[in-house]
Image (spheres, coloured by chain):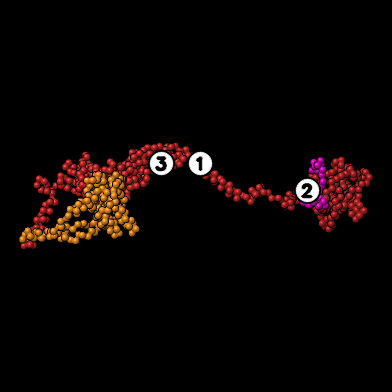
Amino acid sequence: MTILGTAFGMVFYLLQAVSGESGYAQNGDLEDAEPDDYSFSCYSQLEVNGPQHTLTCAFDDPDVNSTNLDFEICKNLVGVECLHLSKLQDRYFLRTKKFLLVGDSKICVKLGDKKITCKNINIVEIVKPEAPFDVKVMYHEEAKEFVVTFNTSHSQKSYLTIKDLIHDVAYRQEKDEDNWMHKNLSNTKLTLLQRKLQPDAMYEIKVRSIPTDYFKGFWSEWSPSYHFRTSESKGEWMDPVVLTISILSFLSMALLVILACVLWKKRIKPIVWPSLPDHKKTLEQLCKKPKKNLNVSFNPESFLDCQIHKVDGIQARDETEGFLQDAFSPQIEACEKQRLGGGMQRPSWPSEHAVITPGTFREDAPLRCLTGNVTACNPPILPSSGSPNCGDSDKNGTHVYQGMLLSPRTTNNNLSIPCPLQLGILTLNPVSQGQPILTSQDSPSSLQSEEAYVTMSSFYQNQ
Amino acid sequence: MFHVSFRYIFGIPPLILVLLPGASSDCDIDGKSDKVFGNILMVSFNALDSMRDICSNCQQNASNFFKKNSCDDNKEVKFLYRAVRKLKQCNKTNNSEEFNDQAERISKTTLILLNCTSKVKERKPPTLHKVQPTKTLEEKKLLKEQKKQDDSPCFVKRLLDEIKTCWNKILRGAKKH
């Protein structure tokens, strides 16, 4: 019996529970009514009006018929068990300081006295801060930056203080819609560098806040926008020019340094610090071998064969040389052959011997010399090395004839010049005037000069 | 017999639950106590401190409550529990509404943070078979004065200060660990 009674009790209990959850209308009719979506969301604002907080709730579905619906909050309230929200158009609003702010409270949608749907919500986790205000932008010219400052009412609150908030600063150019740039910060001051903003542009800036740490919730409404214009930065326009100039100057300096290093030894150093030339080397450079195989020697004997011309007689010399070259060139070759065949040595000429060239006969001074007046005759004495180069060096006809004496008459005739080596030494002898005689001294060389004289006279006689 | 079965079925289990040993208070402090204390409780304590007009001439007379209860080591949670319950029992008519609100915040918040599973009974209920002794006039007078003293703003203020001190001690100990 006990067991049977227990079973009947359980059945009756279940029946009552099931019937209570079905769609049982108040008029008693059983209807399969579609359940309305009474889902809702709420947010709270702390210390909005002094110590009083606010709670705002609304249905997620705006089409819900909220005519007879009410909102109620219970649990974790100070001094009361439950509080009712007042209806304002499509929202439900409550202003009170009775929130305990600890633990979950129960918010229910009531239809009369019947609770339709409930939610356990912690008031401190649905906090929506108040919107910031008083946004200002100041330009610091020396630092070339824009300082953004704003204010918030939470700086003077007890619960949700400024340290419990994170601020979002959004700015954009007015012409760029939907191109907002965001910066998060925990204080109420932000610095924007001028170089990161467009010059001479209009900007819009606004701020909003969100709770952090112990308090949680949603973003506040945006603050009123602030508009500011960036200045025309001349420095920015000149920066590319200055940059280009600086780069070019740097490159040119680098190039100069490189060239200086490369050309230092070869060109720059000799100019800046010229080295003293070596006299021997300089002399060698100066006395380079001439193109025409001239004798480079300071031995006077090597110049005995050279013709000595006065400045005045250059023109005559040129004519005579041309003439003599044509006349004597084959005879000279014959003499050379005889010399080479006889094996004769060339006599060494003293330096005092005078050499008289045919070119001098056309002038008065040489004529006086030929007449035996030595004092009047002052022919240049040129040493000669005695080498055949002296005779061969001047191809234009400057021929040197050793110990040769030529009378004026011979200049007009074709002369057959004997070999110079056979003439011997020729010296000037101050004999009586009118005798163009050159006698040799009493020595073996004088014998040679006599032979030369004889030969010359015979040569003259032959003529 | 039928109604007897109902009594046994639906009556015994609740009775068992009630008769379960509930004298021990198992309190487990919430892990977020430090944040709640810093963001919520301290606001109330600061608001009470600003009410300097209350208890300006309090005498440091020792109350029986403080003689029996103190925030000693390993007894902090027990003291807080008893202190906030005492606070709730105090007559609030002598205090301002703002004072009473802040005091209630502190007591309720402390109880939530302590998260005690059962209530601590401060008094044993009198048995039906024992006859209560008759109190003398002097004892009655003494109890009246004691109750008056406990309801004074000074006692309430001191009680709140002791609660704040004990909370600081608990949180400092929690940080060390």
Q: CA distance from mark 2 to mark 3?
A: 99 Å
Left or right side of B94 for A410: right
Dot 3: what SS?
Answer: strand
- Report x, y in % for residue A370: 89, 44
Tell me the subunit letter for badge 3: A
Q: What count of labels does the image hold?
A: 3
Q: Using residue A314 as the reference point, say whether residue B130 is left or right of it.
A: left
Which residue is labeled 3 in the image?
A: A147
For the residues bearing labels 3 and 1, Cβ distance under 8 angstroms: no
Task: Looking at the picture, tell me which residue is in the foreground, A344 or A366.
Answer: A366
Residue at point 8%, 62% (across, down): A3
Disc 3 residue type (three-letter): Val
Residue denoted by label 2? A394
Mark 2, mark 1: which one is toward the viewer? 1
Q: Nearer the viewer, residue A333 or B100?
A: B100
> Which numbered tag is attached to residue B60?
none
Dot 3 and dot 1 within a common chain? yes
> Chain for mark 1?
A
